[in-house]
Amino acid sequence: MLLFTSDLDRTLIYSQRMMEKFPSKTAPIIAERKEGVGLSMMTEVTMSLLQQVHQQTLFVPVTTRAVHQYERIHVIKELRPTFAITSNGGTIIEQGHPNKEWSKILRKRIEDSSIPKADLLRKFNSYQSDEWLQQSFYVDELFYVHYVDVNIIQDVEVQAMIQEFAVHGWHVLLQGRKLYFLPKVLTKEAAISYLKEHCTYNMHVAAGDSIMDYGMLAIADKGYTPNHGDLKDKQPQILKNTMYSPYNGEAFTKYLLEDVLQLANKQPIV
């Protein structure tokens, strides 16, 4: 059995803007709706391939999205994967319900390794400015996402926060308009490592576009990352086990899923 852990946004599903930037050869279909409005897309080709992958592998969707945001993606929910990982590794959904053991383990790790959120917020208040801070969200009571004006916030400010909060067990990362504050132990690879202890598989394949997927790809037997992603530009070092694809958008997704199917067909039955 092949274990396939994959990021969702910009790896399997795409915003309309991304679909327009990297047009697919076939018409897109809606993969996610919010209040009746389509937010994310795939194509019939990649949807069909993903269904086959789900049937032939242990497919685990992995995302930084909050649980409620993940649950909007109807094309994934309809597959009913045995496991899904949300909240950047903060929640393992097993058979539709949060895994309580993992939640307990993770929260103890966070408590032991980072300052409490009240102290974090006090320190953040000395940095934040109404000029660049637009919105703030506390995601699943685990980490913060601050939407910022990237034209105003200065790199020197971001670097100062990175250094300040690293000492206190928090990882600061600016991705586009999102300024993340995450406990250092809150990672996708931590949740996957826990899951791997409880699963039977022969090979672990991982895919993701972002630097937040780097650790997940690093612990896999084989990884895939698209040309349109930022992982290749921000990574600490090149991952020898990872295929740095020349493809963008849906072309990457199609190549990825076809390759996963080929690898799955080579695995012995467990």
Image (tube, grey):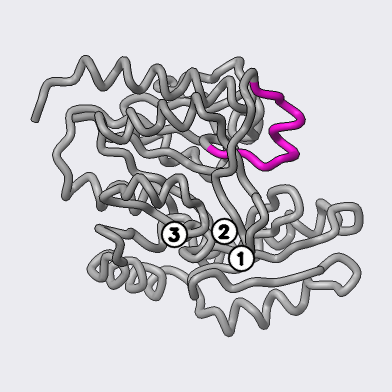
Q: Which mark is residue 186?
A: 3
**Above or below, 38 relative to 246:** below
How packed mark 3 is, by other alpha carbons closer than 10 Å (few <14, some 14-19, many 20 or more), is many
Q: Amino acid at mark 2?
A: His
For the residues labelled 1 and 2, the Cα–Cα distance comes to 7 Å
Toward which corner of the image does residue 58 lie, by quadrant? top left
Left/right of residue 138 with respect to residue 124 in the rendered view: left
Residue at the location (54% across, 68% down)? 143
Residue at the location (17% across, 44% down)? 199
Q: Earlier in the sequence, mark 3 or mark 1?
A: 1
Name of the residue lying farthest toward the left: 270
Return the residue nearer the eye: 207 or 114.
Answer: 207
| Callouts 3 and 2 close, C-beta under 8 Å | no
| Nearer the camera: disc 1 or disc 2 | 2
**Above or below, 21 relative to 213:** above
Residue at the location (12% across, 21% down)? 268
| Callouts 1 and 2 close, C-beta under 8 Å | yes
Return the residue nearer the eye: 189 or 250.
Answer: 250
Q: Which mark is residue 29?
A: none
Q: Disc 2 marks which residue?
A: 171
Q: Disc 1 marks which residue?
A: 165
For the residues labelled 3 and 1, the Cα–Cα distance comes to 14 Å
Q: Amino acid at mark 1?
A: Phe
Tag 2's secondary structure?
strand
> Which contiguous range is marked in magenta?
13-24
| Residue 265 is covered by the magenta coloring | no
For the residues labelled 3 and 2, the Cα–Cα distance comes to 9 Å
Q: Earlier in the sequence, mark 3 or mark 2?
A: 2
